[in-house]
């Protein structure tokens, strides 16, 4: 898994990107293009969640905090200050990174469930604050009147796809560099890493900040797609959705997470005919996948394919 | 003042029943059971079906509901958790998916609307000048009794000491020939039963609807962390802390701030004393 | 619809069309149905009653030959209570299903999130569930983009606040003789909009507002709040909630035999079986209610009885009558416009004057349903012994004498 990228990986990635790029031309439905746009934003979130949590083994249950921070920042800039909406993207990234630093320093020394819960409460606190200070934040309804970045929906789809492809490439390359090796080593034995002279704290904080930054970018894109942000973005449900996607994709692989996001979003669409039974069928399928494929679906599948093509 | 004292005690008692079960599972099996909220919801709905649909008397219905949910817990451990126990995150995800399924099944069977579980005791009493419904006092009494019994069980019986042994050192316990699978199943059953008991007691004055399990579970999670993962006295103390701080905030500031309190408490505990009040330092 | 079902569907349509064409001539075969999109929370009672009531109206209209020779057809999409899913539902209905009109809604937050997407899809939307004034405010702020938005039901929270203020001065103060009131409401958009107006109205009427506080929608323990009300020495408690825990609130109020009567807007308490669901603990609670079996208009009782017969449920929740009327309001407008072109239909919708199950429906310049006597108005309905309901206010609608909580009777 740690081997550097092979030409097979590159071909596989190119094929996947090409498929996503021509998908709108194939489906010819504005609605499905919208669904895919959201799916790819989720893919960006899933990949960056995986970068931090999949590699270091610290499950971040408050990831929604970064998503919400990015989305609200973009929303505030656009609606309250009427700045050029494109500024929302870098600002969203900065806000998310800022939060990751504030929360990261005190919590990253925690392990397992402790870190998970610390982040979870961080996100939930922000959600509560959004509701309590409703005069400023719009409360339950959130911010509305956010302008679209591009008038063309197809154009926006390609913008999101481009941003995600570049981000995922950066994340994959980082994960396969010496940086990734160190993160995985920290997962295995933090004390030895420390003893070997590695600045463990730096690596953990930096990886959380990177993960958060891309989350914030996704959040800002999301805000400009939905044209609205609401406190529900901060909720545990958002985080859980992202984690499930990573898990189905195969943890620690990053590209698998994107696959998981697209796959699960399309699955919810396919199940639409089940009406009110949809969520039940979805959760049952989820149980089956989790139970029989504990390593996930996408990444193991790709490894098999790659092996077969040898 | 007397109001804070009494209402805070009832709130804490409900939290304690949920948190103790949650922490037992973690302490013994080292798993975070995200289906804990489903036990609570299932308990309330079973009591609803038995009393309102099948018209059974209240007391036997309550007992049956607790037993049924305990059985469900054991079954869940057997069928889904045990095969995956090697991986923490796999267990986390499978229990999460289970809770989604339970919620959806309740949704589709009973609809989204509230259901009513009748009170064990009706009427109101006046205690220290505070009006309180009899059901709340019953809840307080029963939960204190149940938790004391659990304490006795763990301290005084063979199975209980096996549970204690496994929670202190699973490997050593294994070498000593303690059947860890049986211990896990027992603990899962106990924990589920306690959650169901909390639900049967609290349902008459709290809500009964399909999503009712999530909030109590998050609270239990928080309490357990504050008290120290795996520690029963810790979670009881955590429950008291949280129950009282919520009640005090509701009185002094505003009810819309109560939810914030537990969250801030958790975050502060984690930052200042990650092992929790009674946790072992080795646990983190 | 999956592609396969769509193919099968169109095959069936072709087959039907072919046989019909032989007997009826080409006109009927060429008319595609008018598609009505229903974005609503289908797992909730509000959603089920919206859909069922609309289906009743559609069946009635179709039985009489449809509109402009075209049948009506419903397409339902689940909007849940989550803005993301809500936006998705709108996109599905407008871009994919290509519906002619949207009728639905429940949570104000979801509806507000959907508005820009409805406006971009240039599709008419008739709201039947969300009460926030901000929804129709957009029509005023930006008519060109938001002219597609109408609200049939419920009555704008601002109007509800005024009706509530009137109830306080006319009923609570004048008839019950209680001057000190407390106001508590859930921390949700429509309540935040409503409370300031209500407070001002009550104070202007001479009431002594002892306290007003918002509580979290997830509140599970009301005892601290109730204690504060008691300490404030209020004599009447005005409660405003819908998403929050109506059941928990009345249970705890009843169990404590709380010595202050309650009334206001409790959306769940508008349901016909609420009394049963809380074990009778809502006794004497008064709530605004637009959905009750009473001769509000000649159509109200027939609609109510037909609904009970069709669904076997106790009666529609608050979205029911509005959803039923919305289909008629739209159908009438299409008939007058002689087309489903949105701009033409909007012109006709603005002229709506229709007597439906809700009352007489007209829209004001923000496309909001007008409220008042002779138009759409609400009764203040009280739960009485054995789950009977009586309208206790306004006077002209009164159907029974108001009662006090059993523990306050002298």
Image (tube, helix red, strand yellow):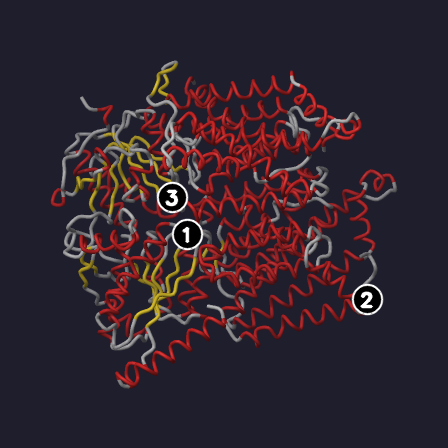
Foreground: disc 3 or disc 2: 3
Marks 1, 2 in one chain: no
Q: Secondary structure at mark 2?
A: loop
Foreground: disc 1 or disc 2: 1
Residue designated by label 2: A6
Give the CA separation, mark 3 to mark 2. 56 Å
Residue designated by label 3: B113
Give the CA separation, mark 1 to mark 2. 48 Å
Query: Disc number at residue C43?
Result: 1
Query: Disc number at residue A226?
Result: none
Quarter residue B78 falls in: top right
Q: Is residue B50 left or right of residue C377?
A: right
Residue at image point 60% right, 66% down: A160
Q: Is residue C390 left or right of residue A153?
A: left
Residue at image point 46% right, 68% down: C1
Q: Residue C356, percent across and down? A: 20, 59
Q: Residue A176, percent across and down? A: 79, 57
Q: Secondary structure at mark 3?
A: loop
Q: Chain of mark 1?
A: C
Dot 2: within a 10 Å radius of its alpha carbon, few (fewer than 14), some, or many (20 or more) residues?
few
Q: Chain of mark 2?
A: A
Q: Check the image and report above or below for C204 versus B8.
A: below
Give the CA separation, mark 1 to mark 3. 10 Å
Residue at image point 41% right, 20% down: B3
Q: Check the image and report above or below for B144 versus A107.
A: above
Which one is nearer the viewer's eye here, B131 or C145? B131
Marks 3, 2 in one chain: no
């Amino acid at each position: 898994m740690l081997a550097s990228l092979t030409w097979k990986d590159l071909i596989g990635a190119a094929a996947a990107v090409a498929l996503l790029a021509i998908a709108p031309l194939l489906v010819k439905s504005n609605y499905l293009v919208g669904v895919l746009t959201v799916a790819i934003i989720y893919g960006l979130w899933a990949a960056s969640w995986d970068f931090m949590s999949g590699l270091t083994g610290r499950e971040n249950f408050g990831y929604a905090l970064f998503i919400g921070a990015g989305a609200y920042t973009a929303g505030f800039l656009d609606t309250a200050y009427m700045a050029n909406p494109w500024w929302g993207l870098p600002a969203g990234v900065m806000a998310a990174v800022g939060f990751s630093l504030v929360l990261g320093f005190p919590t990253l020394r925690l392990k397992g469930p402790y870190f998970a819960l610390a982040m979870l409460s961080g996100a939930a606190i922000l959600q509560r604050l959004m509701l309590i200070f409703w005069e400023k934040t719009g409360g339950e309804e959130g911010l509305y009147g956010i302008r679209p970045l591009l008038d063309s929906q197809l154009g926006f789809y390609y913008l999101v796809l481009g941003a995600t492809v570049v981000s995922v490439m950066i994340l994959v390359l980082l994960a396969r560099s010496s940086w990734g090796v160190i993160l995985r080593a920290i997962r295995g034995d933090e004390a030895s890493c420390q003893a070997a002279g590695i600045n463990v704290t730096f690596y953990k904080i930096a990886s959380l900040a990177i993960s958060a930054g891309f989350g914030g970018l996704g959040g800002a894109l999301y805000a400009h797609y939905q044209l609205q942000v609401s406190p529900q973005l901060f909720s545990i449900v958002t985080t859980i959705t992202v984690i499930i996607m990573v898990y189905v994709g195969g943890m620690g692989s990053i590209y698998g997470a994107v696959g998981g996001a697209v796959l699960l979003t399309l699955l919810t669409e396919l199940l639409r005919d089940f009406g009110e039974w949809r969520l039940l069928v979805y959760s049952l399928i989820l149980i089956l996948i989790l139970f029989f494929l504990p390593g996930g679906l996408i990444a193991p599948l790709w490894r098999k394919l790659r092996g077969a093509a040898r | 003042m007397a109001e804070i004292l009494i209402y805070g005690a009832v709130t804490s008692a409900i939290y304690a029943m949920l948190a103790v079960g949650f922490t037992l599972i973690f302490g013994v099996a080292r798993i975070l059971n995200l289906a804990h909220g489903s036990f609570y919801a299932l308990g309330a709905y079973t009591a609803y079906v038995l009393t309102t649909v099948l018209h059974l008397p209240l007391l036997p219905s309550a007992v049956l509901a607790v037993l049924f949910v305990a059985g469900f817990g054991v079954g869940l451990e057997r069928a889904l958790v045990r095969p995956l126990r090697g991986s923490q995150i796999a267990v986390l995800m499978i229990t999460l998916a289970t809770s989604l399924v339970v919620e959806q099944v309740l949704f589709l069977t009973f609809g989204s609307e509230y259901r009513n579980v009748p009170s064990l005791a009706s009427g109101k009493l006046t205690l220290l000048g505070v009006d309180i419904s009899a059901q709340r006092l019953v809840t307080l009494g029963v939960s204190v009794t149940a938790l004391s019994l659990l304490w006795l069980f763990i301290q005084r019986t063979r199975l209980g000491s096996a549970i204690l042994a496994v929670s202190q050192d699973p490997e050593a316990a294994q070498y000593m020939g303690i059947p860890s699978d049986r211990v896990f199943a027992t603990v899962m059953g106990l924990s589920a039963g306690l959650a169901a008991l909390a639900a049967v007691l609290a349902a008459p004055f709290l809500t009964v609807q399909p999503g009712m399990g999530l909030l109590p579970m998050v609270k239990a999670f928080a309490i357990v962390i504050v008290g120290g993962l795996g520690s029963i006295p810790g979670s009881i103390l955590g429950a008291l802390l949280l129950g009282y701080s919520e009640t005090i905030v509701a009185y002094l500031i505003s009810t819309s701030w109560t939810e914030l309190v537990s969250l801030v408490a958790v975050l502060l505990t984690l930052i200042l004393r990650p092992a929790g009040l009674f946790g072992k330092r080795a646990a983190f | 619809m999956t592609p396969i079902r769509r193919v099968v569907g169109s095959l069936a349509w072709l087959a039907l069309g072919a046989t019909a064409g032989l007997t009826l001539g080409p006109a009927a075969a060429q008319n595609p149905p008018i598609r009505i999109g229903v974005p609503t929370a289908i797992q909730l009672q509000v959603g089920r009653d919206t859909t069922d009531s609309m289906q009743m109206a559609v069946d009635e209209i179709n039985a009489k030959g449809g509109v402009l020779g075209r049948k009506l057809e419903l397409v339902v999409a689940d909007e849940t209570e989550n803005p993301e899913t809500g936006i998705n539902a709108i996109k599905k209905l407008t871009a994919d299903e290509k519906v002619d009109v949207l009728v639905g809604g429940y949570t104000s937050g979801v509806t507000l999130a959907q508005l820009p997407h409805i406006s971009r899809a240039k599709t008419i939307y008739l709201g039947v569930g969300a009460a926030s004034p901000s929804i129709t405010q957009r029509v005023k702020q930006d008519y060109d983009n938001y002219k597609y938005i109408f609200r049939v039901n419920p009555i704008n929270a601002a109007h509800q606040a005024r009706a509530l203020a009137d109830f306080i001065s006319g009923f609570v103060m004048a008839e019950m003789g209680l001057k000190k009131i407390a106001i508590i409401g859930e921390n949700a958009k429509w309540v935040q909009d409503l409370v300031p107006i209500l407070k001002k109205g009550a104070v202007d009427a001479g009431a002594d507002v002892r306290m007003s506080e918002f509580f979290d929608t997830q509140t599970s323990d009301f005892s601290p709040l109730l204690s504060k009300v008691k300490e404030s020495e209020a004599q009447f408690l005005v409660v405003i909630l819908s998403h929050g825990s109506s059941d928990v609130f009345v249970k705890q109020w009843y169990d404590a035999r709380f010595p202050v009567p309650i009334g206001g807007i409790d959306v769940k308490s508008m349901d016909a079986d609420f009394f049963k669901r809380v074990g009778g603990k809502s006794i004497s609670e008064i709530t605004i209610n637009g959905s009750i079996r009473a001769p509000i208009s000649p159509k109200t009782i027939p609609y109510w009885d037909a609904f009970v017969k069709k669904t076997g449920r106790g009666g529609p929740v608050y979205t029911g009558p509005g959803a039923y009327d919305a289909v008629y309001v739209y159908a009438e407008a299409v008939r007058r416009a002689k087309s489903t072109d949105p701009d033409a239909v909007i012109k006709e919708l603005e002229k709506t004057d229709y007597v439906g199950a809700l009352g007489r429906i007209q829209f004001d310049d923000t496309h909001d349903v007008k409220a008042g006597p002779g138009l759409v108005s609400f009764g203040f309905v009280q739960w009485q012994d054995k789950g009977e309901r009586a309208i206790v206010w306004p006077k002209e609608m009164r159907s029974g004498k108001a009662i006090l909580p059993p523990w306050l009777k002298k």
